[in-house]
Amino acid sequence: EAKQKGRNIFQLYTPELSTQAQQRLVLEHSLYKALERQEFSLHYQPQFCLTSQKIVGMEALIRWHSEEHGWISPAQFIPLAEETGLINGIGDWVLETACQNIKKWQGLNSIIVPIAVNLSARQFQKNDLVKTILNLLNKLSISPRLLELEITESIAMQDVQHTVSVLRNLQKLGIKIAMDDFGTGYSSLAALKYFPLDKLKIDQSFVRDLTVDSQDEAIVKSIIALGHGLNLTVVAEGVETKAQLDWLESMGCDLAQGYFISRPLAESDARAVMG
Ligand code: C2E
Ligand code: MG
Ligand code: MG
Ligand code: MG
C-alpha cells in the first residue's frame, strides 16, 4: 500500500515533467471527478439592448469550484476539457442545465429572455448535436426561441460545409446562432457569407480601449457595419465603462454585454434581473 502510494507520487513528480505538465495532470485528475462531485454551476450575464434599454438576453457561463483547487476559470479548464474529451460530458451538462433553468424560469412566470450557451469544438463536431438539442427541447418542452448557441470562428472554420449544415439545421429548429469573439479568429469574409448566423459578438479585446484607441474604434465601426450589412445583430463584449457604452450606442451597435452592465450572475440573481 505504502509502496503503491510512493510509486504514484514518484510518477506525478518525476523531474522529467515540467511544473506546467504536473499542474496540468493534477488539474486533469480533479476535472475528471468534477461532474460526479457536482462542482460545476452556471452563471448568467445579461445582454443589454442599446435601443430599448432593456435586458434582452443572457449568456450562460460555466463556473467550477474544485475541491482541491478552489475556483478555476473556464479559460483554464475548458481547453483542458477539450483536449481530454471530458468536454463531452461537461458540454452536455451545460446544455441540460441551461435548458432546465429556462424551464424553471418559465414555470415561475418570469419574463424570459433567450439564454445563450457556448459550444466547444468537439461538441460542435459531434454528429448527434442537433438531435441531442432537439431531444432536450422536447423532453423539457421549452421553446427553441429561448435557446441561443455561441460558436467561435475557429470552430466554424474547422469544416465549413459541416458548419453550414449544422447551423442550418439548428436555425430550422428556431434556435439563434451567435459568432463569438469575432475578429480574433481567422474566418474569411467569404465564409462568413455562407454561415447562417443571427448575431456577431465583437471580441472584448477591441472594446477594451474604445474612446482611447482610434484603431480599435475603426475596427469596431467596421464590424458593426459588416454585421448590419449581413443583417446580423451586433453585440459588444466586455463593456466596462459608461464611455464605451455611449460610444457603442452612438455608433449604432445593437447590444452590449460587460461588467458595466452586469457581472455574470448566480441563477437567483439572474432571475431577479429578468423581472
Ligand atoms: P466568452 O464566451 O467570450 O465569454 C465572455 C467572457 O468574458 C466570460 O469569461 C465573462 O465573464 C467575461 N466578461 C464579461 N464581461 C466582461 C468585462 O466587462 N470585462 C472583462 N474583462 N471580461 C468580461 P469567463 O466566464 O471566464 O469565460 C471565458 C471563456 O470560457 C468564454 O468566453 C468561453 O469561451 C468559455 N466558456 C465559458 N463557459 C463555457 C461553457 O459553458 N462551455 C464552453 N464550451 N465554453 C465556455
Ligand atoms: Mg460566449
Ligand atoms: Mg466572447
Ligand atoms: Mg472569449
Image (cartoon, grey):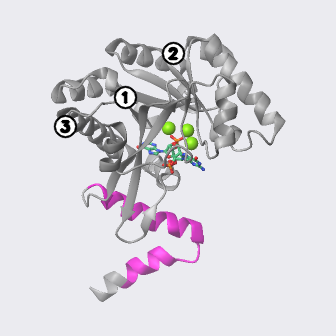
Q: Is residue 263 above or below residue 2?
A: above
Q: Which residues are magenta?
A: 6-35
Q: Is residue 53 above or below residue 239?
A: above
Q: Residue 114 has which mark? A: 1
Q: Is residue 74 magenta?
A: no
Circles 3 and 1 in contact, beta carbons < 8 Å: no
The one nearer the camera, 151 or 261, is 261
Three-letter code, disc 3: Leu
* Left or right of 137 on screen, residue 171: right
Q: Horizontal and vertical percent for residue 129?
A: 34, 27
* Residue 22 seen anywhere in this rendered image of the structure: yes
Q: Residue 161 has which mark? A: 2
* Residue 183 seen anywhere in this rendered image of the structure: no
Mark nearest the camera among 2 and 1 is 1
Q: Horizontal and vertical percent for residue 108?
A: 19, 37
Residue found 31% across the figure and 42% down from its top = 271
Alpha-carbon distance for marks 3 and 2? 41 Å
Three-letter code, disc 2: Gln
Three-letter code, disc 1: Pro
Dot 3, crowdedness within 10 Å: few (<14), some or many (≥20)?
few
* Left or right of 254 on screen, residue 136: left
Would you name the residue on which mark 3 appears? 108
- Mark positioned earlier in the residue sequence (2 or 1): 1
Disc 2 is placed on an element classified as helix
